[in-house]
Structure formats: structure tokens, C-alpha cells
Image: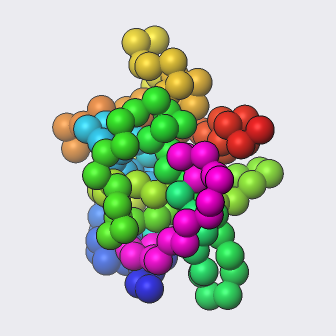
Amino acid sequence: MSELTLERALAAQGEGGDEAVRGEGELVKLVLFTLGADTFALFGRCVGEILARADVFFLPGCPPSLEGVINVRGDIESVLRPHGLLGLPDGAAGPGSPILLCRGAAMKSGLRVDEVIDVADVPGAAIEPPAATLPPAVRQAAVGALRFGGRLVTVLDLDKLFAACAEELG
């Protein structure tokens, strides 16, 4: 199992990577990823690790949003598929897709995403309210949106995403 900590990802970008945004207000660390054709982000403080590859063990009788469990250095973690929770098609997330190990206020779990695009510091002022035209499930979990690298990125609230999962699990 290969893993990438946020610190290593930022170090790989180089020391001067955030010079262009310094002085534009408070910086917010975001982990940007895709689910299908859409781009999303979570606040970096919620993502502890990015697992490039992990064996997920299926649990019979679970809803589609719960892919299974993984062993992370002796700890058993659940792995969620956020596609269904957000009302999106399942996308390209498969056994080789990355897993974001996330910790919210009341829950922790892995999130299977299609692709991790970047770990970046962005000016907090660049995050605007989410568009009213977002699909209902996405809008419910969204806290904002921004443009990054020519993409429209929806910033998600991890706790709202976890609440949707808990609701589905009953």
C-alpha cells in the first residue's frame, strides 16, 4: 500500500509554490479531486492522508455508498463512495483509484475518488457561495465554489457528506 501525506505532496510542489497568492488574504488548504466529470475540494484540515492504492474488503449487506473496509497500519477504516451520496454517476473510481482518509467532527472514513488533482493553498476570499443550480444532493453538502486551473470546483463540507452517509446507513 502506497501513501502520500499532505506534507509530502506540498513538498513535492516546491518551496515557492504559493508566492503568487501571498498577500491576497488568508490562505486555505484544499485537496482537489474529481468525481466523474465534476471537480470537488475538501478542506485540507479534514484530509489526513491520500492513499494511492489500498485493498478494500467488501462487507455484505452494506449500501452502495459503503465500498468496504481497509487496513491502514493495523487500523480498520471504512471506505465510502461519495458519488451516490452526491447523486452523481459512479464514475471511474475503481480498485486503483485514490482514497482520501478523512476525519470530520463525529466520524472518520476513507473517501474513494476518481482522481486527486492537487493539494493547494488558495485565498479564502476566492471561495464564493455555491451556485443555486447545483444538483440538490451536491448543494446540500457544498459550502462554496471557486475557479482553479480553469475548472469550477465545488468545495464540500465533510461533516455534511458524512451526515448524508449516516442517514443512508439508517
Magenta-highlighted residues: 51-66
- Asked if the magenta segment contains residue 27, the reply would be no
The picture places residue 10, in percent across and down from the top left corner, at 39, 71
- Quadrant in which residue 91 is drawn: top left
Q: Residue at x 35, y 36 (%)?
A: 89
Q: Residue at x 55, y 66 (%)?
A: 58
Q: Residue at x 53, y 25 (%)?
A: 137
- Asked if the magenta segment contains residue 53, the reply would be yes
Res. 64 in view: yes
Of 139 and 68, the residue lying toward us: 68
Indicate left or right for 108 with 120 as reference.
right
The picture places residue 13, in percent across and down from the top left corner, at 29, 71
Does 111 sit above or below residue 63?
Answer: below
Total residue callouts? 0
Q: Quadrant of the N terminus?
A: bottom left
The picture places residue 103, in percent across and down from the top left corner, at 67, 59
For this orientation, the residue located farthest to the top is 132
